[in-house]
Structures are given as C-alpha cells and as structure tokens.
Amino acid sequence: MSRSVPWQDIETVFLDMDGTLLDLHFDNHFWQEHVPLRYAEKHGLSVDEARQLLYPKFRAREGTIDWYCIDYWSRELELNISDLKKELEHLIQVHPHVIDFLVALRGSDKRVALLTNAHHKVIELKLATTGLDEHFDQLICAHSFRIPKEDPRFWPRLAEEDPFDRDRTLFVDDSLPVLRAARDYGVRHLRAVRLPDSKAPPKDTAGFIAVESFDELARGL
C-alpha cells in the first residue's frame, strides 16, 4: 500500500482538528488533569477522588455528540468548561509542518475543509489562538448534525448537506473509530495521524496508512 497521496486524484480534503492539525496534549491534559482538579476544588475532594467520579461519566458518553459538547459538560459537572479551557489556552499548539502543508494545499486546486467533532465554542477558541481558519474553504462541525463523525449516520448526512466524491476525497484524522466510519461509507483515501499527542507514545494505526509528519503528507502537492 503506497504511503504517498495520489494528489492528482484528489479534489476534496477533509482535515480533523484535535490530534490531527493540533496537538492532542491540550485536550488530554484538560480532561484528565485540569477538569478533575477544578471539580475537586469545587466539591472538596482529592483529585483522585474526582477522577473516580468523573471518568465513568466520561466513558458513558464516548461515541456520542455529548462527549464533545462543552455545554453538556458544563451542565453535567456544574463547571464553566469554556472558561476552564481558556485557562489552558497556552497549551493549544499546531503540529509541526501543518502550516506549510495548509499553505501548499491552498495553492493547489483542492477544496479544503476542516471537519471536526469539536464544539463551536472550542473551534472558535482554537482558531482564534492558532489562526488556522484562513487556510480553509469551509468549516464543518459535527454539532450542526447532532451526530459525531464516528457514527455511521454522519457520513451520508454530510454528503447530503455538502456533496463530495468519495473516490476523490482525502480524509485525515487521528481517531480510528472515525476513520472506520469513513471507510465504511466509502471514502477512498484515508490517513491516520500516528502521533496525535506529542507527550504520548505513537499510536498503532490499525491498518490505516499512518501520517508520521505533515511534510511527508505534502509530498507531490
């Protein structure tokens, strides 16, 4: 299986945000460390006690749009999740070579869209921090459909709202469930980010062609 992208065959590029273009360390640190800390402070608990209460709540919503909804978690945890994210804004980082890759894409004849499960408020914060929005023709948020990208119903719904040729589309994501849903729908060109979190070990991409770095992905553009 060739690792290089057949750019001559691509007309649409869908790019995930968290863990793909942006370092997932921000999100992992936020949910694993910062939210438990602030929850513990609010309720007079130790951080470990807070984790024991919070982690089952998190696991119960995985794979649903609620997991990505900061309004849902603000209500559920009685914390202002949007404000808490701003406390860690300095941790929002773009992966190496991403900007050069996006600039090269914009100089090509491809349609480039950000395709994310992130909540609108999170998208706004991260794009304001990174300036990535100038590189996209379109921003597509799964919350508009109330279905996350890993749900099989998402892809036909996306195609209804925003038609694309499955054979001529490249989709890059760090989530294996999301990539499997795209593959099952028939998206032909798929790439999995191997190092979504710079502070964690590389991922096994489970048969999907891995993106080791974005300068590699840009070859041939």
Image (tube, rainbow, N blue to C red):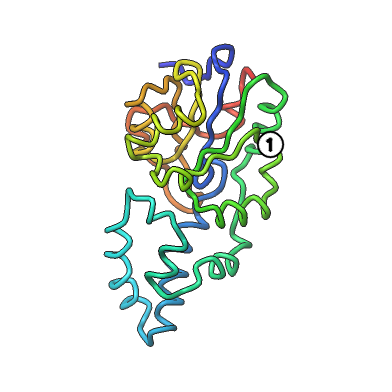
Q: Amino acid at mark 1?
A: His
Left or right for 210, reference 124 = left
- Quarter of the image with the N terminus is top left
Classify 157 as above or below 58: above
| Residue in front for this viewpoint, 176 or 126 | 126
Crowding at mark 1 (Cα within 10 Å: few <14, some 14-19, many 20+): some
Q: Position of residue 102 (x, y in %)?
A: 66, 33
Left or right for 215, reference 172 = right
Task: Spot the residue most to the bottom.
Answer: 44
Classify 60 as above or below 156: below
Residue located at (44% from left, 57% from top): 69
| Residue in front for this viewpoint, 144 or 115 | 144
Q: Position of residue 81 (x, y in %)?
A: 49, 67
Task: Spot the residue most to the top.
Answer: 8
Helix, strand or loop status at disc 1: helix
Residue located at (40% from left, 40% from top): 149
| Residue in front for this viewpoint, 142 or 175 | 142
Q: Position of residue 35 (x, y in %)?
A: 44, 70
The quadrant in which residue 50 appears is: bottom left
**Residue on which disc 1 sits:** 135
Left or right for 160, reference 134 = left
Classify 183 as above or below 16: above
Residue located at (33% from left, 71% from top): 51
Residue located at (55% from left, 34% from top): 213
Q: Position of residue 215 (x, y in %)?
A: 61, 30
Classify 37 as above or below 129: below
- Quarter of the image with the C terminus is top right
Tally of numbered discs: 1
